[in-house]
Image (cartoon, rainbow, N blue to C red):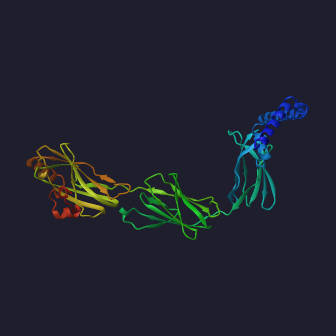
Amino acid sequence: SADAPHALVRALLAETAAIAARLNFNYVIKTRRMRRALLAALLILSASAGLFVFGGSASVLLVKRAFLFTTPLPHKTRITSITGDKKIGVGEDFKLDVTVEGVIPKTGQVTVTTHSGELRQYPASPVPGHPGAFSALIHSQQENFTYYVKMNDETSPTYHVTSLQRPAVADVVCVQTYPAYTRLAPLERHTGDLSLLAGSTLKITARSTLPLQKAWLKLTGVDKEIPMSIDPNQTGISGEIPIPAKDLTGFSIHLLSTEGAESADTATYRIDILKDQEPTVRITYPLNREELATQQAKLLVAFDAKDDFGIAKVELHYTIDQGQEKIVPFDLEGRIDKNVGRRYEWELDKLLPPLTVGSVIEFWVTVTDNNDITGPGVGVSEHYQTKIVTADEKRLDLANRLQDTISGVKEVTGSEEELNKTLGQGIFAKPQGQ
């Protein structure tokens, strides 16, 4: 039948299983060698693990090298940082810094090979106060060289130091631009005479002996740097320094060539800052600090003011019986002059509140310059006083003066013509609200 082959196979398997159950396979397959091999393998793995743990970080390095990594061999002393490759100027000292870990040696050794093949050795000395830090100074190198450092059992790779020609500054030209309020034209200044008005701008142009990638002005006294512009041919440079009111004492020009060399022994140009002087003003009339006047009098006030660049505002200040301060602004007709001499006829009967006999007017003049950068500066005259008296008291005062000298007579009875000559041009108060 169709099921006969299947029944035969099942019967064969059952018979085979029954026979196998009665057999001992240890007599057929020998396992002693295999057990010994497994035991040996376990012992080797255990020993290797113990040695790996004992070796610490060095074990990791060795494993990496076993897998063909370029990790350096472990050493008792390890260099963790070094100056490396560098570019310096011709004749510049080269300072080498090295930091190590592990066993810290007392000193190290730097081996230098010059471009011409000369071999030199320098000590790497410990840096006080910084454990593991060493430094070496290689003086006045005139050519390219290579170097490597040996610290105990560790040797660094070879590094290259390139000696480059330094750029230098030439043809320095300085031009001072004054603040606009001075109405002065720009002025070329010699580098040895930089006495500059505060608020000015100093424009500096110069030339470099080598093509540049960077140039900057370093200011002294204010600890600030200002970048300079480089023209297309990479040798012309220009920059501007705003002149503050204080602290700035000079500047120097620093250059960095396209090859990476920085200028050395840069000259420092001194700057002296000049302050805009405050204006001065003095009252030229009345002649006496204390005067008498009636309630209906016109008090003549004349003054003379000066400033180094120009006066923008003049005001008459006054108080009555030490009361609230009031101001009479004067009209300068839009002019800004360095010297202003004017007279003002002050109509006392128009003051409010009206004056009474016994009132004391204290007055003074202030002038303000046109300095809108570091100012304005203000000048103040001495204070004068006028006491309001009766007509009889004023006549008595005039009579007493007539008895002094003839000049006293002229002082009291002087003509308008004489006043114009001695007291200057008339000035008017500004209309109220201006």
For this orientation, the residue located farthest to the bottom is 233
For this orientation, the residue located farthest to the top is 22
Q: Nearer the viewer, residue 17 or 43?
A: 17
In the image: residue 216, left or right of residue 197: right
Q: Residue at x 21, y 59 (%)?
A: 343
**Quarter-wise, where is residue 147 in the image?**
bottom right
| Rendered-image quadrant of the C terminus | bottom left
Residue 266 seen from this side: yes
**Quarter-wise, where is residue 63 in the image?**
top right
- In the rendered image, the vertical position of residue 230 relative to residue 35, given as above or below: below
Residue 406 seen from this side: no
Residue 294 horizontal/vertical position (percent): 11, 50
In the image: residue 182, left or right of residue 206: left
**Quarter-wise, where is residue 415 in the image?**
bottom left
Q: Residue at x 20, y 63 (%)?
A: 420
In the image: residue 423, left or right of residue 296: right
Q: Nearer the viewer, residue 416 or 171?
A: 171
For this orientation, the residue located farthest to the front is 1
Q: Nearer the viewer, residue 9 or 53?
A: 9
Residue 149 horizontal/vertical position (percent): 77, 49
Q: Residue at x 81, y 39 (%)?
A: 8
